[in-house]
Image (cartoon, rainbow, N blue to C red):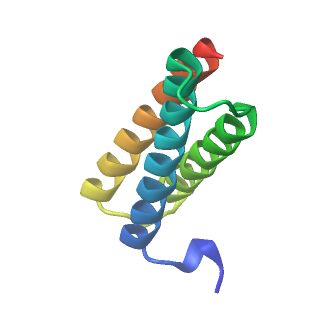
C-alpha cells in the first residue's frame, strides 16, 4: 500500500512516534555529553535521533500535502511540523 493512501490519523501517529523517539535519543546524547555518565561516543546516537526527527517531519509534511483532509487533521499536521522543526533547529544549534 502506498503511503499516500494510508489514513491521516495513522500517519500522524507514526510521525509523532518517530519524532518523540528522535527527540528522546538526542536529549539522551546531550545529557550524556554534559554530565559524562557513560564513556561512549554519542555522535551515532545523536545522528539516529536527528534522522528519526527528519523522518517524522517528512511524514507530517506528507499529510499536509494530501488533498482531501479535514481542518482538524491539517492543524495537527501543522503543529507537528512546527514542533519537529523547532526541535531540529535546537539540536543543530547544540551540536
What residue is shown at x 53% (from left), y 15% (from top)? 34
Q: Is residue 85 visible?
A: no
**Percent from the top left, x then y, of residue 37?**
53, 28
What residue is shown at x 51% (from left), y 55% (from top)? 18
**Percent from the top left, x then y, of residue 33?**
59, 21
Residue 32 falls in which quadrant of the image?
A: top right
Query: Which residue sits furthest left?
Result: 72
What residue is shown at x 51% (from left), y 78% (from top)? 6
Q: Is residue 80 above or below residue 11?
A: above
Of residue 16 and residue 61, the one placed in the foreground of this image is: 16
Q: Is residue 15 above or below residue 91?
A: below
Query: Which residue sits furthest bottom?
Result: 1
Residue 57 vs residue 83: left or right? right
**Percent from the top left, x then y, of residue 29?**
57, 31
Of residue 72 and residue 48, the one placed in the foreground of this image is: 48
Q: Is residue 18 above or below residue 81?
A: below
Residue 83 vs residue 36: left or right? left
Number of disc labels: 0
Q: Is residue 11 visible?
A: yes
**Percent from the top left, x then y, of residue 24?**
46, 41
Q: Which image quarter holds the C terminus?
A: top right
Q: Which image quarter holds the N terminus?
A: bottom right
What residue is shown at x 57% (from left), y 23% (from top)? 91
Amino acid at each position: 500500500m502506498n503511503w499516500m493512501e494510508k489514513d491521516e490519523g495513522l500517519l500522524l501517529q507514526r510521525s509523532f512516534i518517530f519524532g518523540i523517539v528522535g527527540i528522546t535519543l538526542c536529549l539522551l546524547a546531550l545529557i550524556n555529553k554534559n554530565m559524562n555518565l557513560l564513556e561512549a561516543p554519542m555522535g551515532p546516537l545523536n545522528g539516529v535521533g536527528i534522522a528519526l526527527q527528519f523522518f517524522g517531519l517528512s511524514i507530517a509534511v506528507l499529510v499536509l500535502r494530501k488533498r482531501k483532509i479535514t481542518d482538524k487533521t491539517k492543524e495537527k499536521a501543522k503543529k507537528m511540523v512546527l514542533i519537529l522543526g523547532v526541535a531540529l533547529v535546537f539540536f543543530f544549534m547544540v551540536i
